[in-house]
Amino acid sequence: MDVLSHWLMGSGATNGRAKFWVAGSMGVLPDLLVFVPNSFFLDERPDITDETVTADFGWYAWEAYQVTHSLVWATIGFLFTWIFFEKRGVTQRLFTNSTLSARDAAIWLWLPWFIHIVNDIPTHTAKFFPTPFLAPFSDLHFDGYRWSTPWVWFTNLAIIVGIWSYVFYKKRKNSIAQERP
């Protein structure tokens, strides 16, 4: 799936609890941590077509992808973040709500990352970065559909519109409730 979709889904799903830039960044980090460093290992970036396969991106991309797109590793990251927030406190630079518990802050911080992984499971084919969501315990993955397939793309767009419609509906509802005497 494209990084803009991951950004919008991740930032919308937190519904303003994590700052927009924080939630958006967490939504795209699984891909950025793979493809930005990988660009230093490749002489030239492969063209992405229907014929492009994972191996076209070299060794680093697949090794990093197995970590950044694993629900197991993401859960470990979430748990370490929770422990960190318990010991050091929740930094308000990342969140809009100053009363979040350490657990809730870790949930809202990592939710976009988890959404990214769940979205990638059905939108990657077995030939082009199949999502190893149970790595390192299993290589299980699904042969999904490319996100560029029109019906997948339009479904993705509908989900983003639905998430943001709900966000704006809740904001409007809360502002009307605060205006009433």
Image (cartoon, grey):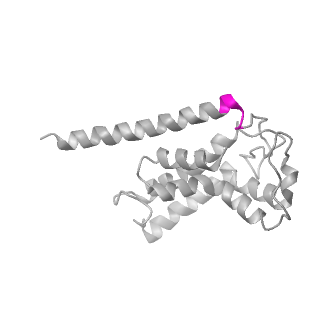
Q: Which residues are magenta?
A: 147-152
Task: Please give the name of the residue rendered at 40% of the width and 57% of the height, measured from the top-left corner.
Answer: 101
Left or right of 157 on screen, residue 134: right
Please identify the quadrant where the C terminus is shown: top left
Counting the numbered discs, the total is 0
Q: Position of residue 5 (x, y in %)?
A: 59, 45
Task: Please give the name of the residue rendered at 83% of the width and 55% of the height, measured from the top-left corner.
Answer: 57
Could one spot residue 175 in this view of the protein? Answer: yes
Q: Position of residue 158 (x, y in %)?
A: 55, 32
Vertical order, 131 against 67 (above or below): above
Extreme-left residue of the structure:
181
Vertical order, 34 against 147 (above or below): below
Vertical order, 91 against 76 (above or below): below
Task: Please give the name of the residue rendered at 54% of the width and 62% of the height, measured from the top-left corner.
Answer: 81
Task: Please give the name of the residue rendered at 72% of the width and 56% of the height, measured from the top-left corner.
Answer: 67
Q: Position of residue 17 (x, y in %)?
A: 41, 52
